[in-house]
């Protein structure tokens, strides 16, 4: 098989800049595709934090006026990633995160910031960099959704475009008067182009104009085609269902490996799960929980947002406490949810512990020390923390939606008897069902042989990128064949 060149474009990439799972996927997939003959180079914005981490930079092109300021396209390497970086200080070098300022307010010029990124992806696809002609442009999420629009309306030879939906809740819908500043022709403003309910829709553009749409789990792929799960986009998605496929996410099993993890107290393999006791004790200490080796310890590592259903967990806390259990939560985001958990700590000192903020090492420690990991999401395109949990022998307790439904096998009697069960699922996504799941988990935990079986089965699951990367490679190859034919 000859080599396939793919230009990926994403607004975040682990380990350089991350707010969620998108970064993990953008960072891990290139590594997994390399042995399959797919060479991925990834275009990212030159945020200040990214610029600081680049090794071996080379200016590919000076861009005297790129969306309102002087910019450069840089080729660079960092953390084993092969990158193009759009260094546009007027767009990306500012205080705050990738999307919002330090007080959490979205940058007002986000449509321009990400339009500029998508435009660069299209230009690279058309040969802007000497001797580089990718066969595929793979664009991730709304921030890059205009890439296929630029390619469609420019005319001429263009690479095939794959557009991946990581989260339909973020659609990038903006004022139609921006059309000209975005450099899009008037003819693009139609329902078959970038128009979306009278606005410009970035995600809509990706979904409408890409050659293939992928999303991050098979179940989410079907959910988003329904009015309940489609968030206004289901009609369009149903119309393109023959171009839509769900490819399950995975995790970087080098970064997430309990047998070598430098961030945890005691390393262990599937045959040594008893060694997790030291990690549990360390986590209880860190989260100011009572040193109680017998208490079932539930962990959460999450953005605090409506999507993640943590308000339901707040309501279910009395049931968790009644089971003699503890909660260790690491999360950041919504202030009201944070206040809710603060109040819960005061109500149940020593039984509920939280760290608010973003802490990569602590995320590993929660996975290695908690007995179970809770993911009560209202919707979940894939979810990565339940995959980490499987790998770390923490039993996932999840709502039966999206990728959670696809990755956890519920401990029903038959699955338990067959040794197939890896966790607990609940539905519907309501407090009462979550409470039942917490009770089920606590009672299974109190049967050590059964619990161990769940842990071992979970740790035996292949959560690596090997399988999914193969599916992406096949998708790319199919598109190339289609083009040639
Ligand atoms: P989403 O992308 O919707 O936030 P995922 O489960 O796909 O959800 O990915 C979340 C990623 O972010 C995981 O790698 C998880 O470990 C990490 N993460 C989430 N919250 C935190 C936090 N507060 N501190 C450290 N890591 C976090
Ligand atoms: C999104 C989704 C999450 C998914 C991640 C990576 O942030 O919320 O479910 O795992 O993207 O695809």
Image (cartoon, rainbow, N blue to C red):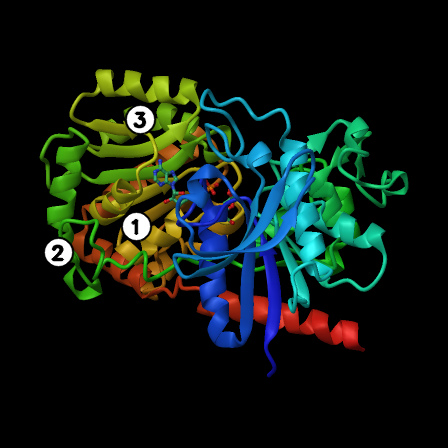
Camera-side residue of 94 and 210: 94
Left/right of residue 285 with respect to residue 57 in the rendered view:
left
Camera-side residue of 16 and 339: 16
**Mark pair 2, 1: CA separation:** 14 Å
Disc 3 marks which residue?
317
Mark sitting on residue 274: 2
**Mark pair 3, 1: CA separation:** 18 Å
Q: Residues within 10 Å of mark 3 (few under 14, many from 20)?
A: many
Residue 41, above or below 290: below
State whether residue 189 appears in this view: yes
| Image position, residue 446 (x, y; %) | 18, 46
Please tell me which of labels 2 and 1 falls first in the chain. Answer: 2
| Image position, residue 392 (x, y; %) | 27, 55
Q: Is mark 1 within 8 Å of ligand 1?
A: no
| Image position, residue 246 (x, y; %) | 60, 57
Disc 1 marks which residue?
395
Left/right of residue 270 with respect to residue 103 in the rendered view:
left
Left/right of residue 379 with respect to residue 66 in the rendered view:
left
Q: Residues within 10 Å of mark 2 (few under 14, many from 20)?
A: few
Q: Are marks 2 and 3 in contact (CB under 8 Å)?
A: no
| Image position, residue 265 (x, y; %) | 14, 49
Please tell me which of labels 2 and 3 falls first in the chain. Answer: 2
Q: Residues within 10 Å of mark 1 (few under 14, many from 20)?
A: many
Mark sitting on residue 20: none
Q: Quadrant of residue 353?
A: top left
Q: Quadrant of the C terminus?
A: bottom right
**Mark pair 2, 3: CA separation:** 27 Å
Q: Secondary structure at mark 3?
A: helix
């Amino acid at each position: 098989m000859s080599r396939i060149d793919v230009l990926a474009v994403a607004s975040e990439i682990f380990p350089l800049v991350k707010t969620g799972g998108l970064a993990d996927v953008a960072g891990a997939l290139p590594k997994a595709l390399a042995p399959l003959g797919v060479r991925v180079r990834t275009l990212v914005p030159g945020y200040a934090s990214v610029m600081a981490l680049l090794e071996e930079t080379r200016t590919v092109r000076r861009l005297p006026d790129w969306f309102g300021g002087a910019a450069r396209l840089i080729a660079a390497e960092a953390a084993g990633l092969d990158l193009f970086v759009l260094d546009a200080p007027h767009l990306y070098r500012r205080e705050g995160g990738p999307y919002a300022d330090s007080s959490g307010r979205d940058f007002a010029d986000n449509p321009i910031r990400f339009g500029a990124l998508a435009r660069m992806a299209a230009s690279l696809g058309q040969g802007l960099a000497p001797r580089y002609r990718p066969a595929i442009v793979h664009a991730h999420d709304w921030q890059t959704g205009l890439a296929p629009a630029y390619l469609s309306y420019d005319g001429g030879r263009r690479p095939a475009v794959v557009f991946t939906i990581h989260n339909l809740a973020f659609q990038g819908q903006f004022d139609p008067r921006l059309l000209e500043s975005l450099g899009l022709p008037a003819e693009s403003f139609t329902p078959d182009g970038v128009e979306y309910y009278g606005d410009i829709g970035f995600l809509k553009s990706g979904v409408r104009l890409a050659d293939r749409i992928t999303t991050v789990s098979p179940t989410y792929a079907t959910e988003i085609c329904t009015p309940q799960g489609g968030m206004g986009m289901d009609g369009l998605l149903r119309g393109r269902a023959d171009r839509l496929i769900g490819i399950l996410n995975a995790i970087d099993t080098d970064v997430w490996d309990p047998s070598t993890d430098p961030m945890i107290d005691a390393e262990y393999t599937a045959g040594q799960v008893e060694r997790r006791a030291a990690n549990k004790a360390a986590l209880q200490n860190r989260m100011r929980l009572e040193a109680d080796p017998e208490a079932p310890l539930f962990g959460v590592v999450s953005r605090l947002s409506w999507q993640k259903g943590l308000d339901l967990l707040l309501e279910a806390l009395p049931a968790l406490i009644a089971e003699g259990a503890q909660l260790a939560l690491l999360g950041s985001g919504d202030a009201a949810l944070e206040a809710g958990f603060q109040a819960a700590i005061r109500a149940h000192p020593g039984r509920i512990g939280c760290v608010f903020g973003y802490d990569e090492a602590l995320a590993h420690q929660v996975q290695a020390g908690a007995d179970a990991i809770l993911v009560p999401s209202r919707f979940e395109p894939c979810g990565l923390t339940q995959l980490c949990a499987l790998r770390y022998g923490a039993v996932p307790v999840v709502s039966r939606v999206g990728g959670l439904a696809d990755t956890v096998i519920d401990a029903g009697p038959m699955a338990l008897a067959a040794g197939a069960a890896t966790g607990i699922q609940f539905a519907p996504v309501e407090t009462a069902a979550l409470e039942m799941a917490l009770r089920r988990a606590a009672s299974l935990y109190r049967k050590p042989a059964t619990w161990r079986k769940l842990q071992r089965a979970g740790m035996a699951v292949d959560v690596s990128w090997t399988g999914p990367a193969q599916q992406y490679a096949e998708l790319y190859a199919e598109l190339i064949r289609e083009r040639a034919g």
